[in-house]
Amino acid sequence: MLRLLSFALFIATWWIASLLIGDAKLPAPPAVLSVLVAEARSGALFVNLGATLARVALAFTLAMALGSAIGYLMGRVSLANRLGDPWLILLLNLPALVVIVLAYIWAGLTEVAAIAAIAINKLPTAVVTLREGARALDPALDEMATAFSFPRGRAFRHVILPQLAPYIAAAARSGLSLVWKIVLVAEYLGRPNGVGFEIGVAFQLFDIPLLLAYSLSFAGVVLVIETLLVQPFETRLTRWRLRAA
Amino acid sequence: MQLEVNITGKSFESAAGKRHDVLDNVTFTLNAGEVGVLFGPSGCGKSTLLRILAGLDGNYQGHVTRSPGMRLGMVFQEPRLLPWRTVEENVRLAAPHVGDSTLSALFEVLELGAHRNHFPAELSLGLARRVALARAFAIEPDFLILDEPLASLDNALAGRLRDQVATLVASRKMMTLLVTHDLDDAVRLGDRLFFLSSRPARILHVETIAAPRATRGEPEIDEIKRQLSQLDLANM
């Protein structure tokens, strides 16, 4: 109910602002909605959203998997940490634009280049978070697992992974928002479809209703994924804490 | 099954780079069916010794010979349960082959039946200790290590838990090593008492109690305690 109210407030603010500023710069909600419906009817909206989502999913999975593994290793093995740390600092501070442009120059304007560039942007934050998680692992529980001769797989699944879970969730949460932001830039600069490409087109044509239609439907998708996927996942991970007396 | 302990020294370096000797000469043998008690002042290195015997610390001088294939059950000073798993899952993860009836019997002795599906954070310290005990017994160990299982519980609770431990220890022919600094617990639960010095720890005195554990009455226990308290351990 409160969410609905806050959504209504957003629409109202937008409408009033468009009346004040004028239709040319900020079209009113109905104008944007009609463009949105037209794009949806032609199917272009879904093709572009789908392309963007696929890129997000691939780059996110790649960066999370690789980043978690590297971060865990760096947190557990001090040699790995000393070797990896300068690279990590470099990657952390490298602007997203540099990575994307270089990827397109070196690998061509290809799907692989786009996904790799997005993944590389997200990778270091996952590494840093998981490294913290691996450093915070409780040695007492490690000892328990050794004393009771837990096999490696069981120890990882039941002793290590639950301790890393909040860190993985944090990395996923911050990483996902980073990927949402970067994917559009990568598409804008070098892909023939996707929300970022359409926004680029709208920018060149100064087609503000189209720009807003894509921006808002993209924001809608992000919201839905956050509420339906990310938040339930976080709740599930911490259910043993919620029940604590 | 037998455990031969022949440790000649153990030290570690502190963060400041200073060498600390924790263990001196500790030599003893433990046989199946026997309960050894390590008795000594706080901080004398008992826990370090246990970690060596459990195979958690290989950095020491001397050697410890364990029978091959020996199954170890360990109750740490803190319960060390997995907070994200229920009581029953905690036990089953350590002992995947435990039968349902064995587990039920164990939970009954330890009065844990009502707590199977609770998470460790929902348990009191006394209950969590009992889960740790259940976990150690569920794997049907050949060698059981109990690191102060009764510490920081009130007298009534500690007494009840001691009886439960005694019942469980008697139910299986295994080597048991108990650490305590309560003489009463030592005399009631142990067959052989190893008195340790303060740091670096060495064995000052070994007291063998001839009477089987189950037959010891209150007068005998008091008599053994009286004799032991007359030992002049400080000057050994």
Image (tube, coloured by chain):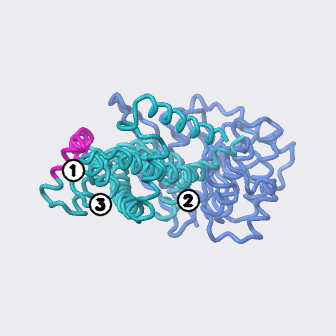
Q: Pointer 1: what residue?
A: A100
Tell whether label 2 touches label 3 (CB within 8 Å).
no
| Three-letter code for the amino acid on which mark 2 is drawn | Phe
Please check whether the numbered discs 3 and 1 fall on a single chain.
yes
**Residue nearest the observer in this picture, A25 or B153:** A25
Q: Mark 1 lies on which chain?
A: A
At numbered mark 1, what does the secondary structure look like: helix, strand or loop? helix
The percent position of residue B75, horizontal first and vertical second, equals: 63, 50
Structural crowding at the residue carrying mark 3, measured as other residues with C-alpha within 10 Å and reported as few (<14), some (14–19) or many (≥20): some
Q: N-terminal of the two: label 1 or label 2?
A: 1
Q: Nearer the viewer, mark 3 or mark 1?
A: 3
Please give the name of the residue rendered at 26% of the width and 51% of the height, measured from the top-left corner. Answer: A188
Shown colour of chain A: cyan
Chain in blue colour: B
The Cα atoms of the two marked residues, 3 and 1, are separated by 16 Å
Q: N-terminal of the two: label 3 or label 2?
A: 2
Please give the name of the residue rendered at 70% of the width and 35% of the height, measured from the top-left corner. Answer: B152
Give left or right: position of A231 versus B62: right
| Three-letter code for the amino acid on which mark 1 is drawn | Ile
- The residues colored magenta run A83-102
| Three-letter code for the amino acid on which mark 3 is drawn | Asn
Q: N-terminal of the two: label 3 or label 1?
A: 1
Q: Pointer 3: what residue?
A: A193
**Residue nearest the observer in this picture, B40 or A184:** A184
Q: Pointer 2: what residue?
A: A148
**Residue nearest the observer in this picture, B81 or A85:** A85
Is residue A100 located in the magenta-colored stretch of the structure? yes
Please check whether the numbered discs 3 and 2 fall on a single chain.
yes
**Residue nearest the observer in this picture, A53 or A132:** A53
